[in-house]
Image (tube, helix red, strand yellow):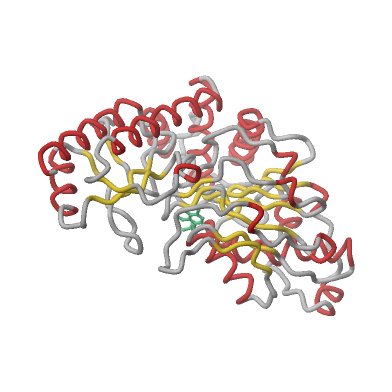
Amino acid sequence: LDREEPNYFGAGPAQLPTNVLQQAAKDLINFQGLGIGAGEISHRSAAGVGIVNHTKEYLRKLWQIPVTHEVFFLQGGGTTGFSSIPTNLSAAFAKKSGKKGRPAYVITGSWSKKACEEAERLGFDSQVVVNAKTADGKFGDIPDVDKWTIPVAEDTPYVYYCDNETVHGVEFQEFPYEKFPGVEIVADMSSNFLSKPVDFSKYGLVFGGAQKNVGIAGVTIYIIKKSLLDYPSVKELRKLDIPITPIAFDYPTVISKDSAYNTIPTFAVHIIELVLENLIKKGGIEIQQQENVKKSDLLYSTLEKYPTFYHLPVTKRARSRMNVVFTIKDGSLDAEFLKEASDVKLTGLKGHRSVGGMRASLYNAVTLPSVQLLADFVDKFAKAHQ
Ligand code: PLP
């Protein structure tokens, strides 16, 4: 059960620590000496419930999640969050206000745009706080807050934003919470989950798919303020024209069954458990954040050494520490870059099809030595081809 350490920069699913996967592989065959694997046990057995509970405990400990917030797991990926957030949070808002309200969206890249479009598709009349898309159809900055249209709190169930836009490499340094008094803040942290400390007291809901920083595909983690779990009756929701959430994605229902209202992917949750255990042993979230800062600083500063050769399309203030997006000259060297990189076993660097160029994803499991190899290659490639 061994492999050469990968230098894989794919955007997700992403590389996980080899020691975690080695343990997971053993546990897939025989979990805790039960003679049966972690993917075969019942999600209602003591071992299955233990996996869910330990994973929640580790996450609470690592990310300092306060008692005011609940942690739970859903299937369906981040995309199911796009659909389940408007229905669930509007129900909670209706309970308090007696109104449907209009959810607000901050659009800084393709994922927040998709989330907003899904709310509209479901019949919500969204308010766009800001749309950072430029006239030529690109994302690459977070506009100044004074250019945002701040919604009226009494009509707004929540304001939604994506903390790290995976495709465009745009990340918030800090969301301007103070501009939204009385409005619940919702963040998609799928691609920077557990990459830095977060003050959860500022949030109504944080969610993220596991498959980038904390596990494999199949589980999405939600951290929700407990006061957002009280809904009116289905009859009342119908009267207010709020779509009813399918039962497997109804947050209070799932939470009341400890994330196992229906069959939870126990093995996929166990991998998260192992990743979190590994991060605790490594020293915790601050250590991880320091490493992430070092890795991204190293790569950005190397790319910046060749300003006529490499182009960084994202403004400095909005640069992601997780997804480093860059293009090479006029694009004619892209294939050569990828080929030469792959020859030295640096893989997963091709940019998203909608953006082109390159994207190096530096998630938690990508090591500093791996990024050093990539930075050396970036340096050599520019010297050879500029
Ligand atoms: N949100 C962000 C920031 C993402 O990067 C992705 C996928 O890459 C998604 C949401 C959608 O996740 P999924 O494919 O799990 O539905």
Report whether 143 appears left or right of 303: right
x and y percentages locating residue 144 in the rendered image: 60, 52
Q: Nearer the viewer, residue 172 or 47?
A: 172
**Where on the picture, by quarter, is residue 91?**
bottom right
Q: Which image quadrant: the N terminus?
A: top left
Q: Give me the residue at 46% from left, 64% from top.
A: 134
Q: Position of residue 124 (x, y in %)?
A: 69, 74
Q: Considering the image in quadrants, where does the C terminus appear?
A: top left
Of 3 and 346, which appears nearest the observer?
Answer: 346
Q: Residue at x 19, y 53 (%)?
A: 334
Is 103 placed left or right of 290 in the picture?
A: right
Position of 286 compared to 354: left or right? Answer: right
Q: Residue at x 61, y 55 (%)?
A: 161
Instruction: From this view, report whether residue 353 is shown above or below residue 318.
Output: below
Task: State how many labels appear.
Answer: 0
Is 96 situated left or right of 43 in this image? right
Most foreground residue, 199 or 347: 199
Report the residue that reaches farthest toward the left. Answer: 384
Q: Based on the displayed image, in which of its 4 quarters is residue 139 positioned? A: bottom left
Q: Residue 11's spot in the image, x, y percent?
A: 38, 49
Residue 37 image offset from top left, x and y in percent = 46, 40
Residue 140 location, quadrant: bottom left
